[in-house]
Amino acid sequence: MVENELLERSLVPKTATKSVKWEPPDGDMANINFDASFEQDHNTSKAGIIARNKDGLIMVACIYPSTNISTPEMAEAWACLHVVTFGEELGFREICVEGDTMMVDKGVTTTGEDRSCISNVIKAVKCKCANFTKIKFRFVPCSAKTTAHALAKEGRSHERLEYWMEETPASVEDIVNKDRIGIGNE
């Protein structure tokens, strides 16, 4: 019995539990976090997108619906495309795009041929990058983008594209305020 306990303890992964919070962007870049909520039963997804400045203040937020989405990876890839399109349409010249899907992050940051199921969407993202003077893609864990995640979940109750200027839906405001309190206090 003791041997079994020791074996079980040795098989438990030893991971450090580091709390990761939202971080402000470099200089005057807009920090745009995104997350997607995939609805397999309907082959749809809703992207939650939030742009903030270096002080953590909301510049603009958006819920963007997509149809004919077959996988969670495809939902995240379309959300990333919506981010760069959104940033371009708003006239941002320098953006930092943050998402939690490694497949999307690697797809947009590598130069080799992409043969993944999301390659066409990744190619569209890369084409739009030329429209910015500076664009940076950054993988962040879910814990660092709780606001975008909450916005994507909120999107499930919205059927069309919706924007909020300098605010978010009430269900997301508390999370934004908690993020802002944490800036510079560590």
Image: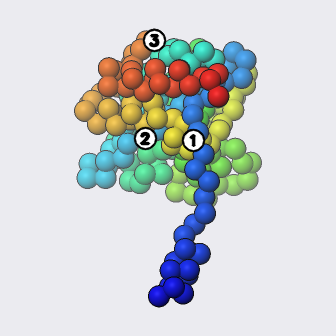
Check disc 1 and report the residue beneath it: 19
**Residue 120 is at least partly visible in this image:** no
Q: Nearer the viewer, residue 105 or 82?
A: 105
* Neighbour tally class for label 1: few under 14, some 14-19, many 20 plus, Cα within 10 Å: few
Q: Residue at x 51, y 25 (%)?
A: 179
User: Residue 34: x, y in percent?
Assistant: 50, 34
Left or right: residue 64 compared with residue 145 = left
- Tell me if label 1 and label 2 are in contact, CB under 8 Å: no
Q: Amino acid at mark 1?
A: Ser
Q: Amino acid at mark 2?
A: Ala
Give the quadrant of residue 32.
top right
Q: Residue at x 39, y 23 (%)?
A: 174
Give the quadrant of residue 7.
bottom right
Q: Nearer the viewer, residue 83 or 181?
A: 181
- Tell me if label 3 and label 1 are in contact, CB under 8 Å: no
Q: Nearer the viewer, residue 163 or 56?
A: 56
Q: Amino acid at mark 3?
A: Glu
Does label 3 or label 1 sit earlier along the sequence? 1
Q: Nearer the viewer, residue 26 or 10?
A: 10
